[in-house]
Amino acid sequence: MVVLQKTQNQAMIPNKERNFLFHVDLDCFFAAVEVREQPSLKGLPVIVGGDKESKRGVVTTCTYEARKFGIHSGMSIVEALNLCPESICIKRGHYSLYREVSDSVMTILSSFTDEFRCASIDEAYLNLTKIINENFNGNPLPLAVEIKKEIFETEGITCSIGIGSNTTIAKMATSQNKPNGITYIPKENIKEFLKSLPVRRISGIGPKSAERLKEKHGVETIGQIMKLETEYEMIRKYGSLGKFFYRVISGEGRTTLKPNDYYGAKSISKGRTFYGYVEDGEPITAEKLLPKLIDQVHQRLTKRFFRFKTVTLEIKLQSNFKNINKSRSFLAANDDKERIASTVFEFLEEFRNTHKDETIRKVAVRVSNFEKRDSKQKSITDYFGEK
Ligand code: TTP
Ligand code: MG
């Protein structure tokens, strides 16, 4: 679903003067990964954290189906099960898998712009001002759709995206339309957007500050704060918070990002868990799946102008969920699809010879150790060129 909030004034502001800050947040992240791994859980109220038998623990996160019953992060399992006794509890989450998926998502996001900042395990900011003004005629929506598509195609999970003229508004916009939404708040719509929101939705206003504002001033919505017009009045009434409120309401905020230096695209990988999947009545095998994965990895590689030195085949065993990785590094960087294919199939054959009784649960192809062919900013055709 796309929520596009516009006013007639928008046409008056030249596109070149707009800033486009994106905030991307994965939907019910840990729970989404668990559902992806166990597709039979799809559509069910699933809770990560807590033990159904002993009724101990707290909800780390839960699917949107569980949220319909009022279950949320931080709630005790006892309370959650009272609200929805049929909930499925995953006692021990797969934390290393969440980290892997997060890294993969961050790699995708960081490939859209150098101005990228990872804010937590499942959220990041991107400054896409230049590319949107230069290549998308000031329309941020096609890029938001592309980002969602890449994440879904690669990791099989959804995210929500908020777009605003600064990071504060972008983050607030994300929560407006979750899960799987895109919300764009143009600068001239900020006041209208903020008016009905609870004060707590402003990033930086925690539950304690919100409680104090309610008790001391009877303030619950941002609209109530907006009744005061000047910065002076806001400071007089709310102290240092008043200065902060004035900035947010006036649309002032961070419009550039200091990138984290640890997220460049370090690898491109494409994998699939195929336990239980069948195609044309036949179980899917690694042999059948690999050409498709190799194609997808190669497409991403060339889209991003990367040349790899290392090829890896990752195999997860069904018997004990252990990963077996086989890698080979070449002296010279290249972007040759045949090289990926021959290396990967050689590794698979080796694996079949040495693990005759093992069933493969997941297979992934990874290329890494990059050199960039051309470091120019991506152009529109890199995203929407022929496939
Ligand atoms: P969030 O993005 O806050 O939550 P979420 O992704 O589960 O749900 P939403 O769709 O509302 O974004 O946090 C990301 C992950 O961080 C979440 O899946 C689980 C973990 N987490 C904790 O470990 N402890 C916590 O208190 C919270 C809130 C989240
Ligand atoms: Mg999230």
Image (cartoon, helix red, strand yellow):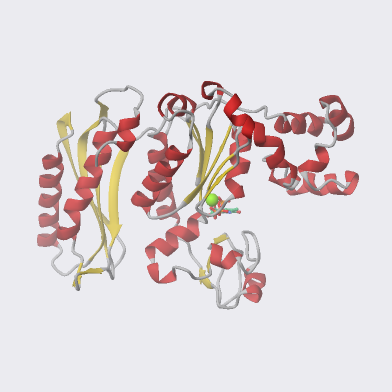
Tell me which corner region of the image, top left, top right, bottom left or bottom right, holds residue 59: bottom right
* Front one among 130 and 51: 130
Front residue of 319/362: it is 362
Quadrant of the frame with the C terminus: top left
| Residue 254, above or below 288 | above
The reply to whether residue 314 is in sight is yes
Q: Position of residue 114 (x, y in %)?
A: 42, 27
Residue found 16% across the figure and 70% down from its top: 357
Residue 115 location in percent, x, y? 47, 28
| Vertical arrangement, residue 310 with respect to residue 198, above or below | above
Task: Report whether 160 appears left or right of 211.
Answer: left
State the image coordinates of residue 373 (x, y, percent, origin top left): 24, 25
The reply to whether residue 120 is visible in this rendering is no
Residue 97, above or below 12: below
Reply above or below: 95 against 79: above
Instruction: Give whichever of 332, 180 is nearer the camera.
Output: 180
- In screen coordinates, is 79 left or right of 4? right
Question: How many badges with numbers are in the image?
Answer: 0
Q: Residue at x 79, y 34 (%)?
A: 241
- In the image shown, does 8 or 176 lie closer to the viewer? 8
Is residue 24 found left or right of 349 in the rendered image? Answer: right
Quadrant of the image occupied by residue 87: bottom right
Q: Position of residue 277 (x, y in %)?
A: 27, 68
Residue at the image point whose x is 28% and y is 49% from the top: 270
